Image (cartoon, grey):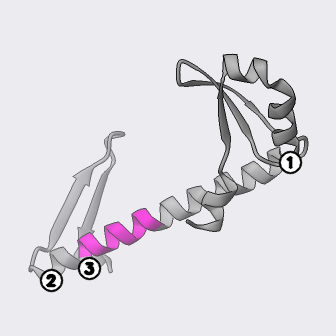
């Protein structure tokens, strides 16, 4: 598990349990562990330590950068495999209609 994943841990509580153990929920949030309140397993609220919003924004930005890097690495691997097989054009259409094209001359 990466440091980013460690930072994204949280404790999940049902509404009933959170009500019954509100002091514990608040203490855990104050210790820095986000507390997720759910209703029938669906997230309803997130209790955070004051000042942790900027930390969470930083973590989410890091995760976004990691996902983008992973996607770019995957697309590069597809391009390399296609070129190794002699395929000179590999493309796909995104949901937004923008076509992504890999050609030998685009290296």
First of labels 3, 2 by sequence position: 2
Residue 65 is situated, as x and y percent measured from the top left of the image, at 57, 62
Callout 1 secondary element: loop
Residue topped by disc 3: 105
Q: Which residue is drawn at 86% across and 48% down?
A: 31
Q: Where is residue 102 in the image (x, y as percent from the top left)?
A: 26, 68
Crowd class of label 2 (few under 14; some 14 to 19; many from 20; radius 10 Å): few
What is the x, y in percent for residue 4? 64, 62
Above or below, comparing residue 11 to residue 101 in the picture = above
Q: Is the magenta stretch mostly helix, strand or loop?
A: helix
Q: Please identify, in this view, whether the residue under mark 1 or under mark 2 is nearer the observer.
A: 1
Mark 1, Cα crowd under 10 Å, few <14 / some 14-19 / many 20+, is: few
Name the N-terminal-most of marks 1 and 2: 1
Q: Give the range drawn in magenta.
A: 70-79
From the viewer's perspective, tell me whether residue 1 is left or right of residue 77.
right
Q: In this view, does 97 lie above or below 13?
A: below
Quarter holding residue 20: top right
Q: Residue 35: horizontal and vertical position, in percent?
A: 73, 36
Numbered circle sitting on residue 84: 2
Label 1 with label 2: CB-CB less than 8 Å: no
Residue 73 forms part of the magenta stretch = yes
Tell whether 1 sits left or right of 29: left
Query: Horizontally, is 2 left or right of 95 in the view?
Result: right
Q: Residue visible at 31% across and 41% down?
A: 97
> Quadrant location of residue 29?
top right
Between 70 and 24, the residue placed more toward the observer is 24
In the picture, the disc for residue 7 is none
| Quarter residue 88 falls in | bottom left
Q: In this figure, which residue is indicated by the disc labeled 1?
A: 31
């Amino acid at each position: 598990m990466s440091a980013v994943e460690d930072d994204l841990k949280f404790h999940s509580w049902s509404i009933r349990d959170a009500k019954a153990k509100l002091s514990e929920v608040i203490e855990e949030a104050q210790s820095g562990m986000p507390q997720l309140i759910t209703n029938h397993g669906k997230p309803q609220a997130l209790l955070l330590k004051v000042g942790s919003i900027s930390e969470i924004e930083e973590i989410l930005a890091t995760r976004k950068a990691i996902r983008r890097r992973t996607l770019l690495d995957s697309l590069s691997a597809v391009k390399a495999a296609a070129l190794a097989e002699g395929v000179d054009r590999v493309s796909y259409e995104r949901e937004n209609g923008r076509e992504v094209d890999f050609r030998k001359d685009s290296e």
